Image (cartoon, rainbow, N blue to C red):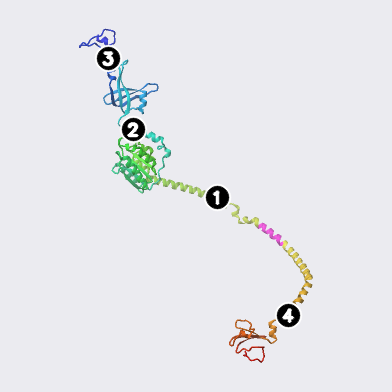
């Protein structure tokens, strides 16, 4: 009887040992369903399977721990409200109730809400911030600046007690000892780390760093959270010089990495990114020297060919060719001049003789009249000449300044005079002065 009841036949209900009536399968499942669905619980587990397909009314997935697994279902409207997509390996926290699918006798967990648990929640927040900064263009490749070649000063922002600071300084001393290192020692973990990192970034940039390294060693996702800070990300993007990040290991990527100008996989790789090795510098210089020598050789070869073409011109083989046309013109002009000049000079001589004859004929009577008048005026000038007066026995007296003495008042006894006569000059001294007509008998002083 019990067997038939369990099979769901129409036989009469049986009683158990305590006198209770036996249940059909449907009734038993209904009883279990009612008891389970009345209980709301919270579960934490790792997602092991996910099935979200177009056309389905719900999302189906499985969560597990080390000892059990639980199939789950979540209606699509609730799944969309969660704000993220489920993926295998996520640690999630579910709120819901157990339910039975009576037709198949299967139990599911009806999920009301789902959230990432522990590190998963942090990753969700970091992903949301990354999308926000990406939308603002802070992670765009076009915004990233090239690193300076051979920077004179390199800024380093990290913990001074960490292994990362040695991971940076060792390759810098080996590869590029000429650089000056500006170290800002700051905490890289804890609540105050983002603000300290931002201050260190500002200080090394203000001190003259041409490029800044922001580094730290490896750690858990929670340990690296200061480098997922929004304020630090914006400070890196706004830094006046390029920023290179080397945070954690190669598999670790933070918000700071996405907005920096260059993301290095490790602190050592960050140091190598800003410091060319001696071998690479030697190779670079050798390559440049070879390129310069080749370019100079080609230039000299072109110049040599150019000079050879110029030197091969007939002008430089026979310098007279430069003036050949002018010399011929000059010879021709000289020939014409030698033939034209005598004839021209003969014509000019004839012209002159004719002009002289005409002048003599025209000017003769005029010149004769002026010649007579000139003779008369010359005679009158001769009569008035002082020399003619002197020749008649007169004399002219001059004082020491050469002025003609015209009055006895102009001299005094003791003055020196020069007396000009017809045949010379007489130097004399005034002894006495007599007034009146020359040669008169009136009393007075004489010379």
**Is mark 4 in CB contact (under 8 Å) with mark 1?**
no
Q: Residues within 10 Å of mark 4 (few under 14, many from 20)?
A: few
Residue 247 image position (x, y, % from top left): 33, 39
Q: Earlier in the sequence, mark 4 or mark 1?
A: 1
| Magenta span includes 220 | no
Q: Give whichever of discs 1 and 2 has the lower sequence position.
A: 2
Mark 2, residue position: 123
What residue sits right under mark 1 in the picture? 306
Q: Which callout, 1 or 3, points to the residue nearer the camera?
A: 3
Give the magenta range: 327-338
Q: Position of residue 189 (x, y in %)?
A: 30, 39
Residue 335 on the magenta span = yes
Which residue is tagged 3?
A: 28
User: Separation of disc 3 and disc 4 at Cα?
Assistant: 183 Å
Q: Are marks 3 and 2 in contact (CB under 8 Å)?
A: no
Q: Relative to residue 312, is residue 386 depicted above or below?
A: below
Q: Position of residue 259 (x, y in %)?
A: 38, 38
Q: Please identify the dominant SS of the magenta region.
A: helix
Q: Is residue 352 visible?
A: yes
Q: Earlier in the sequence, mark 3 or mark 2?
A: 3
Foreground disc of the pair 3, 4: 4
Give the alpha-carbon distance from disc 2 to disc 4, as whole Å: 141 Å
Choose mark 4 or mark 1, whichever is in front. 4
Give the side of residue 98 with respect to residue 141, left or right: left
Nearest-to-viewer mark from 3 and 2: 3
- Residue located beneath label 4 in the image: 380
Residue 207 falls left or right of residue 406: left
Which residue is found at the position 69% from the left and 85% from the top?
391
Who's the residue at 76% across and 66% down the image? 351
Q: Nearer the viewer, residue 249 or 283?
A: 249
Nearer the viewer's eye, disc 2 or disc 4? 4
Q: Nearer the viewer, mark 1 or mark 2?
A: 2
């Amino acid at each position: 009887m019990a067997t038939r009841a369990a099979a769901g036949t129409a036989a009469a209900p049986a009683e158990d040992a305590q006198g209770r009536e036996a249940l059909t399968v449907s009734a038993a499942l209904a009883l279990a369903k009612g008891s389970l669905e009345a209980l709301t619980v919270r579960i934490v587990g790792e997602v092991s399977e996910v099935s979200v397909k177009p056309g389905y009314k719900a999302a189906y997935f499985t969560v597990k721990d080390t000892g059990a697994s639980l199939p789950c279902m979540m209606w699509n409207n609730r799944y969309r409200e969660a704000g993220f997509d489920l993926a295998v390996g996520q640690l999630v926290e579910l709120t819901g109730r157990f339910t039975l699918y009576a037709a198949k006798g299967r139990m599911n967990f009806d999920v009301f809400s789902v959230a990432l648990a522990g590190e998963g929640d942090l990753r969700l927040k970091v992903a949301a911030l990354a999308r926000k900064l990406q939308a603002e263009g802070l992670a765009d490749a076009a915004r990233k600046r090239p690193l300076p070649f051979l920077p004179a000063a390199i800024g380093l922002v990290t913990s001074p007690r960490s292994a990362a600071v040695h991971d940076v300084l060792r390759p810098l001393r080996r590869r590029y000892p000429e650089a000056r290192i500006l170290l800002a020692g700051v905490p890289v973990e804890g609540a105050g780390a983002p603000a300290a990192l931002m201050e260190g970034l500002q200080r090394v940039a203000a001190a003259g760093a041409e490029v800044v390294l922001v580094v730290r060693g490896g750690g858990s996702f929670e340990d690296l959270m200061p480098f997922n800070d929004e304020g630090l990300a914006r400070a890196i993007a706004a830094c006046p010089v390029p920023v290179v990040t080397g945070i954690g290991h190669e598999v670790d990527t933070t918000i700071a990495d996405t907005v920096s100008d260059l993301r290095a996989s490790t602190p050592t790789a960050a140091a190598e990114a800003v410091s060319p090795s001696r071998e690479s510098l030697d190779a670079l210089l050798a390559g440049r020297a070879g390129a310069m020598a080749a370019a100079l050789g080609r230039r000299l070869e072109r110049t040599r060919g150019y000079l050879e073409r110029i030197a091969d011109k007939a002008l430089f083989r026979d310098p007279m060719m430069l003036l050949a046309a002018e010399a011929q013109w000059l010879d021709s002009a000289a020939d014409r001049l030698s033939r034209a000049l005598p004839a021209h000079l003969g014509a000019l001589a004839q012209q002159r003789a004719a002009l002289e004859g005409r002048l003599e004929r025209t000017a003769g009577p005029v010149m004769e009249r002026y010649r007579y008048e000139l003779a008369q005026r010359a005679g009158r000038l001769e009569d008035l000449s002082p020399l003619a007066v002197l020749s008649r026995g007169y004399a002219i007296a001059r004082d020491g300044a050469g002025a003609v003495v015209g009055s006895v008042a102009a001299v005094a006894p003791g003055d020196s005079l020069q007396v000009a006569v017809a045949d010379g000059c007489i130097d004399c001294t005034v002894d006495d002065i007599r007034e009146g007509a020359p040669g008169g008998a009136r009393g007075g002083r004489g010379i």
